[in-house]
Image: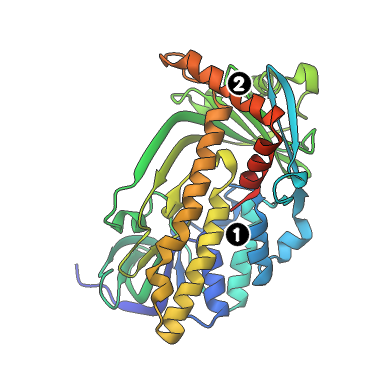
């Protein structure tokens, strides 16, 4: 096959149109740095892909400071409390009165992504949807290249001064990094659900149940996210609506606290809880952000917030390198991001240990159950622990 034509030569190539890639591209465009975003999925798919919905104060501040909060300002809802339900009873934590006193803002990720795409186009940025990255090379040279295939099957070649890998945990950018991640497969699977029904409480609800974790998270006034821990070998089709609602009632203790409001379940998927940490998250002229930089379980809603924080750090570093030739911030990019990643991973792991019962065949199951009760007891009785929880729950 002949060498494809070199049709693009940019300052920065951004792989992936998720929160990390789109925030990064918007900040680069605002700084006058030419960039092109390459996304393998269609625009429709990206704008309808439901993911996280909780934004930290740091994320909201960054979006607001750079004029990326138009939809968020109109439709985002502040959220300041969560509760744990277990055999010991109900523990409600109003985290706006604990720790730093900060709150989350609920704004579904697909709405944020839609906003970021529209703003990037308004700023004159380029996004190529339906464009699959096939190969990446010369990362340690002055002009890295990316080989792509468009929806029509045509292969093209793009070059740039820098490449930002924001294409997810299984994207080609992470695979190009000569670093093996530290991995933890938690052996836990969630059935992730979206229901067209309002939440029956203002709190995020964590069901700490012997049969498995259940979660209830508000998304919009008429849509609620639910999670049910399930057998890793389960088939989504095995869970009909009646079984789902019955199990949510059981694990969220509907007899004592009222049943979740029922409505049509319009999305079902499986989430395998798996965590991966890379060190460093850069190589040559390739820099990772978002899920490409670290895989983190959704147990503490840190993924999108890490992505936005990393995009902000990387945008400043790339801007300085392109505009002034000062690449000192790029050289220390991993050093700036990894403390945030480690902090988020540690708290996420703590939440996993709290929320999920040990496997029945675990020889240490009895011991693990005791520790889980101790964690809940400490949250109930220790003001210091509640403040520490709140600071980490809302942080990043």
Q: Which mark is residue 373?
A: 2
Among numbered discs 2 and 1, the one appearing first in the sequence: 1
Q: Residues within 10 Å of mark 2 (few under 14, many from 20)?
A: some
Based on the displayed image, in which of its 4 quarters is residue 117 positioned? bottom right
Query: Closer to the camera, 338 or 79?
Result: 338
Query: Closer to the camera, 93 or 356?
Result: 93
Are the two marked residues, 2 and 1, in contact with CB atoms closer than 8 angstroms? no
Based on the displayed image, in which of its 4 quarters is residue 256 positioned? top right
Residue 90, percent from left and from top: 74, 24
Viewer can see residue 168: no
Q: Give the secondary structure at mark 1.
A: helix
Q: Quadrant of the N terminus?
A: bottom left
Q: CA distance from mark 2 to mark 1?
A: 39 Å
Residue 112, percent from left and from top: 64, 58
Up-down: is 177 above or below 36? above
Viewer can see residue 339: yes
Residue topped by disc 1: 113
């Amino acid at each position: 096959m002949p060498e494809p034509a070199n049709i693009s030569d940019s300052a920065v190539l951004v792989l992936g149109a998720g929160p990390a890639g789109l925030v990064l591209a918007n900040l680069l465009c605002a700084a006058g740095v030419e960039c092109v975003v390459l996304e393998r999925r269609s625009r429709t798919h990206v704008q309808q892909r439901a993911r996280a919905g909780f934004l930290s104060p740091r994320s909201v501040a960054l979006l607001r400071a750079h004029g990326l909060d138009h939809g968020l300002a109109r439709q985002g809802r502040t959220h300041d409390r969560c509760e744990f339900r277990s055999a010991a009873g109900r523990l409600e934590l109003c985290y706006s009165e604990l720790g730093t006193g900060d709150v989350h803002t609920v704004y579904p990720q697909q709405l944020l992504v839609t906003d970021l795409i529209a703003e990037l186009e308004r700023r004159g940025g380029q996004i190529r949807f339906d464009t699959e990255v096939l190969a990446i090379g010369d990362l340690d040279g002055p002009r890295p290249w990316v080989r792509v295939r468009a929806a029509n099957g045509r292969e093209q070649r793009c070059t740039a001064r820098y490449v930002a890998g924001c294409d997810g945990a299984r994207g080609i950018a992470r695979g190009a990094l000569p670093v093996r991640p530290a991995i933890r497969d938690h052996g836990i699977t969630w059935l992730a659900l979206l229901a067209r029904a309002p939440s029956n409480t203002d709190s995020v609800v964590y069901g700490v149940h012997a049969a498995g974790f259940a979660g209830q998270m508000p998304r919009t006034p008429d849509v609620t996210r639910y999670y049910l821990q399930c057998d890793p070998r389960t088939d989504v089709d095995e869970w009909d609506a009646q079984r789902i609602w019955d199990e949510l009632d059981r694990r969220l203790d509907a007899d004592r606290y009222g049943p979740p409001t029922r409505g049509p379940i319009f999305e079902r998927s499986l989430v395998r809880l798996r965590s991966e940490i890379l060190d460093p998250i850069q190589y040559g002229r390739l820099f990772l952000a978002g899920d490409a930089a670290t895989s983190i379980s959704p147990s503490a809603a840190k993924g999108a917030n890490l992505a936005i924080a990393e995009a902000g750090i990387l945008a400043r570093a790339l801007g300085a390198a392109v505009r002034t030739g000062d690449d000192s911030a790029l050289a220390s990019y991993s050093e700036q991001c990894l403390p945030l990643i480690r902090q988020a991973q540690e708290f996420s792991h703590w939440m996993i240990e709290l929320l999920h019962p040990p496997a029945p065949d675990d020889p240490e199951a009895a011991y693990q159950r005791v520790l889980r009760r101790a964690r809940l007891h400490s949250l109930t009785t220790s003001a210091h622990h509640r403040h520490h929880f709140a600071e980490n729950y809302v942080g990043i």
